């Protein structure tokens, strides 16, 4: 059964009477109706714009991610001004308890603060579904990407539904259609030129590993010395996206470079460390790749993730089975990996152009 407790209110009582066969339980001192998906939807529909529905006692809480503990104390310790509204402490605490990835935390906090500061004179709990729609409409008018808008919706829903325990509070908000952008690929010749034009051995290892193992930037930064298995010629990637551990390829060429790098830099824990012994900066990795591309005389912007896309595409072009590529990339489904078939050059070379027939 679905039980409903509420403070005495004539409007709420009238709406409850409109629900399918409501009854009173003396034992639990509450109104109840049969627990079905249709009835649950009716409750949210009936009270939409009238009352908050707090389902903490009804919905079981699920841990979203099982990553290592994150440190977002920077957001707590920021210098604050009276004219700016900051994300509530409960929001930060829930992100930590749920063990969301650090990058996800940064995105949620940033986007939610932009939202609440759009309504500086209103309390967060006073904001209506209509006001959320108006804010999203503004983002559309500003030509924000579909991804940006979806992430904004997620950050807002996280507060009302996860932090405040109000499931489906904004379940009817429309989301923009998900864009399917093809991965941008760098040719093997261009990548080899980037590596050749990187004189710093540390930077050369970073560019080489991103490409030769198909690593995400975050995965590269998490690599520890023990993750390089020179006997099996594999790289162990821990706590990757969706908390999936996996192995990827270790290039013999890169292994030789890594040995030279290790003797010179002597990292203690992480494969790539900052001068103070902490993990290397993600911005530094982006700058290294960008600088290598400039030195290689590549005119377009090159990002670390493009090297990962290139790794997958080049493997596919060389005849590697799609299932193996899926495993190396850590994709949960081959459908995600199949997108590389749309950019693999060898597939198009087999097609005879109708003009040349």
Image (cartoon, grey):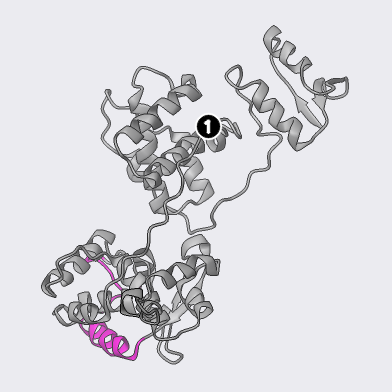
Is residue 89 inside the magenta stretch? no
Magenta residues (range)? 251-276
Q: Quadrant of residue 215?
A: bottom left
Q: Position of residue 305 (x, y in %)?
A: 33, 65
Name the residue: 40% across, 18% down. 122
Please indicate whether residue 183 sits to the left or right of residue 323 in the image: left
Q: Residue furthest right?
A: 26
Name the residue: 50% across, 58% down. 67
Q: Position of residue 284 (x, y in %)?
A: 22, 63
| 68 to 252, vertically: above or below | above
The N terminus sits in image quarter: top right
Q: Nearest the camera: 172 or 245?
A: 172
Count of marks placed on residues: 1
| 89 to 178, vertically: above or below | above
Q: Quadrant of residue 191?
A: bottom left
| 38 to 120, vertically: above or below | below
Q: Is residue 268 visible?
A: no
Q: Position of residue 271 (x, y in %)?
A: 32, 75
Name the residue: 44% across, 28% down. 133
Residue that carries the numbered disc 1 in the rendered image: 160
The C terminus sits in image quarter: bottom left
Helix, strand, or loop for circle 1? helix
**Could you classify mark 1 by the number of other residues whose Cα lies within 10 Å: few (under 14), some (14-19), or many (20 or more)?**
many
Q: Is residue 90 visible?
A: yes
Please indicate whether residue 345 sits to the left or right of residue 45 in the image: left
Q: Nearest the camera: 161 or 128?
A: 128
Please indicate whether residue 18 sits to the left or right of residue 264 in the image: right
Q: Position of residue 16 (x, y in %)?
A: 75, 17
């Amino acid at each position: 059964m679905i039980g409903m407790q509420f403070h005495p209110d004539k409007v709420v009582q009238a709406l409850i009477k409109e629900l399918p066969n409501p009854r009173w339980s003396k034992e639990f001192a509450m109104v109840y109706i049969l627990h079905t998906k249709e009835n649950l939807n009716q409750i949210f529909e009936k009270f939409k714009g009238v009352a908050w529905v707090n389902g903490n006692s009804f919905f079981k809480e699920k841990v979203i991610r099982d990553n290592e503990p994150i440190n977002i104390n920077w957001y707590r310790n920021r210098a604050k001004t009276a004219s700016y509204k900051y994300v509530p402490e409960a929001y930060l605490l829930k992100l930590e308890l749920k063990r969301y990835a650090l990058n996800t935390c940064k995105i949620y906090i940033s986007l939610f603060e932009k939202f609440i500061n759009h309504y500086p004179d209103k309390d967060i709990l006073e904001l209506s579904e209509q006001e959320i729609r108006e804010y999203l409409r503004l983002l559309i008018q500003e030509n924000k990407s579909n991804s940006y808008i979806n992430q904004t919706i997620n950050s807002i829903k996280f507060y009302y539904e996860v932090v405040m325990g109000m499931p489906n509070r904004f379940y009817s908000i429309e989301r923009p259609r998900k864009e399917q952008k093809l991965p941008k690929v760098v040719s093997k010749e261009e990548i080899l030129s980037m590596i050749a034009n990187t004189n710093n051995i540390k930077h050369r290892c970073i560019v080489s590993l991103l490409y030769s193992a198909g690593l995400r930037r975050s995965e590269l930064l998490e690599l520890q010395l023990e993750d390089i298995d020179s006997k099996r010629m594999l790289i162990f990637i821990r706590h990757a996206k969706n908390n999936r551990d996996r192995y990827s390829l270790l290039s013999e060429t890169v292994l030789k470079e890594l040995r030279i790098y290790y003797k010179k830099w002597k990292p203690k824990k992480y494969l790539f460390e900052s001068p103070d012994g902490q993990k290397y900066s993600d911005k530094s990795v982006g700058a290294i790749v960008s600088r290598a591309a400039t030195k290689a005389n590549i005119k377009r912007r090159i990002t670390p993730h493009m090297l990962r896309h290139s790794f997958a595409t080049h493997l596919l072009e060389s005849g590697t089975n799609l299932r193996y590529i899926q495993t190396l990339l850590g994709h949960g489904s081959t459908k995600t990996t199949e997108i590389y078939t749309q950019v693999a050059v060898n597939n198009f070379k087999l097609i005879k152009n109708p003009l040349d027939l």
